[in-house]
Amino acid sequence: MKNKFNNPKTKKEKFTNKSSFTLVEMLTSVSIIAFVFLAATGIYTFSIGSQRKSAELSSLQQEANYLLSIIAKDIRAGLVDYLHYGSQIPSPTSTLALINYQTNQTVVYSFSSNKIMKNVGGSGDQPLTSSEVEVTDLKFYISPSQDPFTSNATTRIQPRVTIVLELKAKGQVFSLQQTVIQRYGERK
């Protein structure tokens, strides 16, 4: 019996029959795996950032809707206080003065120190916005600019208020506009 391990022909066959990777093939496969891994990491990082921005914008939108709903509710439940402004309301104005139809209390909304302030019956300004949100713009367009319910009024248009609001938080800016018609006509 021949010794297989000492046979030169068998050694040569042993190395040529065995399949293996060359250095070029190994470097190519490692670079492809690294490229796929880096691409997946980049996509993951981008999606996390997009999700964060989307959540911040959603939070900002909820805050804006909340603020507009509070102001709109008071407009519908009250009357524009034309006496607060004098002879004619400037357009636009940063202050909205209303008289609550049920309680006859004055409700004043104003824009101060990047916050929306509410003052009911002279009790002092209370901020409506959260500490994380900055109000960058608040305008009220009141139409008509003169009281339509006085005896010398030239028009009998139901008063309406257009609210233009711009909020900013964590680099996100959100603008919103809403027009609300006063529900009641003349004072009690």
Image (cartoon, rainbow, N blue to C red):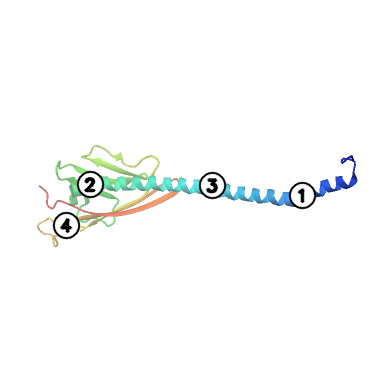
Q: Residue at x 38, y 39 (%)?
A: 131
Secondary-structure class at tag 1: helix
Amino acid residing under circle 4: Gln
Observer-side mark, 1 or 2, equals: 1
Amino acid residing under circle 1: Leu
- Residue closest to the eye, 25 or 185: 25
Q: Residue 44 carries which label?
A: 3
- Residue closest to the eye, 31 or 159: 31
- Work out how far the residue at label 3 is from the one at label 2, CA to CA, in angstroms: 43 Å
- Work out how far the residue at label 4 is from the one at label 3, CA to CA, in angstroms: 54 Å
Query: Percent x, y for residue 107?
Result: 22, 44
In this view, which residue lies farthest toward the top?
123
Quick check: can you spot residue 134?
A: no
Q: Is there a contact, CB below 8 Å, between mark 1 and mark 4?
A: no
Query: Percent x, y for residue 165?
Result: 33, 51
Q: Name the residue under label 1.
A: 23
Amino acid residing under circle 3: Tyr
N-terminal of the pair, mark 4 or mark 2, is 2
Q: Is there a contact, CB below 8 Å, between mark 1 and mark 2?
A: no
Q: Is there a contact, CB below 8 Å, between mark 4 and mark 3?
A: no
Quadrant placement of the N terminus:
top right
N-terminal of the pair, mark 1 or mark 2, is 1
- Work out how far the residue at label 1 is from the one at label 4, CA to CA, in angstroms: 84 Å
Q: Residue at x 16, y 51 (%)?
A: 183
Q: Which mark is residue 73?
A: 2
Residue 52 vertical position relative to residue 143 in the rendered view, above or below = above
Q: Name the residue under label 4.
A: 158
Secondary-structure class at tag 3: helix
- Residue closest to the eye, 14 or 150: 14
Q: Residue at x 40, y 41 (%)?
A: 132
